Image (cartoon, grey):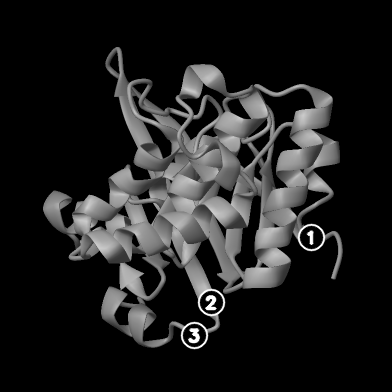
Amino acid sequence: MQTTEAFTNMYGKRDIIVCKNLEKHYARGGETVRVLESINLTLARGAFVALMGPSGSGKTTLLNLFAGIDRPTAGALLVDGQDLTKLSRTQLAQWRATSVGYVFQLYHLVPVLTAYENIELPLYLHELSRAQRHERVSEALEAVGIADRHAHYPRQLSGGQEQRVAIARAIVTRPALLLADEPTGDLDRVAAASIMQLLSQLHSERGQTIVMVTHDPATATHAQRLVRLEKGQLVEDVAVRV
């Protein structure tokens, strides 16, 4: 049997995520619910991956495992060279602050903070000066195309603009991995297309690694690779474009 240490030593620097027999179970009403079963998956650094499947297939659970928000029940999981199964909760929180940016369907912006302040928020977990924080926030605002909205509060922004602020907040720490859970799910068609164009731009121009959960086949066409889950099992893993 391959040990975790041996598995870690085999990790390739070009791979940002490596799953080996990954499983996630929950206890519910005296029964064990197997949300993910024997997931074996390797994702290359710099990839743009769409994670698809019906509701309840385990997509968001897998994304949360990649983010260190949840812990696997069994198996090995390496993300950006780190064995997440070996970290304490405190260590996981510290690792997330530097390695992962997370974009939510419903934005999760703080309503009493401006766009600038929402984006700046995660930087307080880093040892940066005020000038360095300003430089990072300004860079992120420019990257998502809303520098002119920096002083606006979430209530003063459209849904598409709010999601741009959320994306800026996710990339402001310059994470190795950007995770997006249904990033266009609460947007109209025009705003959704704009957000996907932005994510594609971040991928192509910055080489940002992106793993995105989506139900929408049109949204998934922006990705390079399609990974499909059904009933907690990986049933498809194909390249959809170069």
Residue in front for this viewpoint, 18 or 189:
189
In the rendered image, residue 223, in percent from the top left (x then y), is placed at 76, 55
Q: Which residue is mark 1?
A: 238
**Type of residue at label 3?**
Gly
Amino acid type at image mark 1:
Val
Mark closer to the observer (2, 1): 2
Tags 3 and 2 in contact by the CB under 8 Å rule? yes
The image quadrant that residue 159 belongs to is top right
Residue matched to label 2: 15
The residue that disc 3 covers is 12
Q: Which residue corresponds to the image point at 51% horizontal and 56% vertical from the top-left?
A: 140
Quarter containing the N terminus: bottom left
Residue drawn at point x = 72 percent, y = 60 percent: 201
Binning the other alpha carbons within 10 Å of mark 2 as few (below 14), some (14 to 19) or many (20 upward) gives: some
Q: Nearer the viewer, residue 227 or 187?
A: 187
SS for callout 3 = loop
Q: Is residue 13 visible?
A: yes
What kind of residue is marked 2?
Asp
Q: Secondary structure at mark 1?
A: strand
Visible residue check, residue 57: no
Disc 3 to disc 2, how far (Cα)? Answer: 5 Å
Compared with 179, 52 (above or below) is: above
